[in-house]
Image: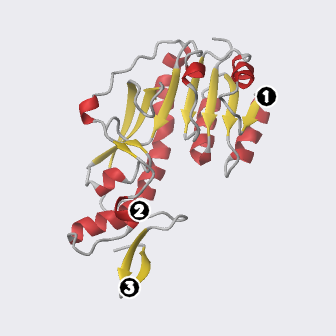
Amino acid sequence: GAGGIAVFCAKPVGVSALETLRDAGVPISSVITVSGEAEAELKNLTIELNTPFYSDLDLKVEDVASELLSHGPSAAMSISYPNRIPVTLLNQFPGGAFNFHPARLPQYRGCFPTFWPILKGDSEADYTMHIMEEGFDTGPVVDRETLQIEDGETGWSLYLRLVEALPNLICRNVGNVLAGRCHGQIQDEAKAEYFSNTLPHDGVVDWHWSGKQIGRFVRALYHPVFSGAKALINNIQVEILQI
């Protein structure tokens, strides 16, 4: 469609996705974000693209949805956008609405998606593109970009590598999105697991675990900004960055 894609995005990965779409010459009908670290950069990109920019919208308000649809988008993409997009709005994009989730689906729905494959000792991790519907991360899977998990990989290093792989996933599928030809495989509910935004064991190491398990836990939780794994040593809580 002439209106192109409505892009719901946040964080540096949202900037990367928008730059990828720009470089591929994809028409963008509007960019919708939230206030935070990437907001200014996203706004600058929309000025360059001459595209309407919105931040901190209440998508449940009918006039807000109408405003976004007034730009005539043919489809929507969501990249790390933290707010729920109402299904009534999702259903009004003629070519569909697609989310990019940095983990394998249906195994790793929900929060901390790069934490679980490391904790569970997986050999691979995915960035998954799926059709959006009412439930979080439940819609049919369109495509995935798969990476090998390296020895010594942390939750943070895996996330950065997945972000680097995201442009491949977008470029491979954006033609079909624009043409309204994107179809997905229905997820196998028998394999589905949803993880809420609480860390296992409250992020605290249990010294009864095996050394391997403790190592994976510490690596999975490593992040340069947020606090990582904790442990009680002589009743004092300390943060463990590396083992």
For label 1, the residue is 50
Whether residue 194 appears in this view of the structure is yes
Label 3 packing within 10 angstroms: few (<14), some (14-19), many (20+): few
Q: Of the residues shown, which amino acid type is indicated by label 2?
A: Leu
Query: Which quadrant would residue 9 be assigned to in this image?
Result: top right
Name the kind of residue labelled 3 in the image. Answer: Asn
Looking at the picture, how far across and down is residue 38, in whole percent? Answer: 67, 48
User: Which is more N-terminal, label 1 or label 2?
Assistant: 1
Q: Distance between the residues labelled 2 and 1?
A: 40 Å
Q: Is 149 drawn above or below residue 33 in the view shown?
A: below
Which secondary structure lies at badge 3?
loop
Which of 82 and 24 lies nearest the eye of the viewer?
Answer: 82
Badge 1 crowding class, 10 Å Cα cut-off, few under 14, some 14 to 19, many 20 or more, is few
Residue kind at label 1, given as amino acid type: Asn
Q: Position of residue 119 (x, y in %)?
A: 30, 57
SS at mark 2? Answer: helix
Q: Residue 221 carries which label?
A: 2
Residue positioned 41% across, 57% down in the render? 155
SS at circle 1: loop
Residue 190 locus on image (x, y percent):
24, 32
Give residue 134's position: percent from left, percent from top: 48, 26
- The quadrant of the image that shows the C terminus is bottom left
Which sits earlier in the primary sequence, circle 3 or circle 1?
1
Q: For the residues labelled 2 and 1, say whether their Cβ atoms are less than 8 Å apart.
A: no
208 up-or-down from 41: above or below: below
At label 2, counting other C-alpha atoms closer than 10 Å, the crowd grade (few under 14, some 14-19, many 20 or more) is many
Q: Which of 98 and 168 is in front in this view?
A: 98
Residue 172 in the figure: left or right of residue 217 = right
Q: Which residue lies furthest to the bottom in this view?
A: 234
Quote the CA–CA distance across marks 3 and 1. Answer: 57 Å
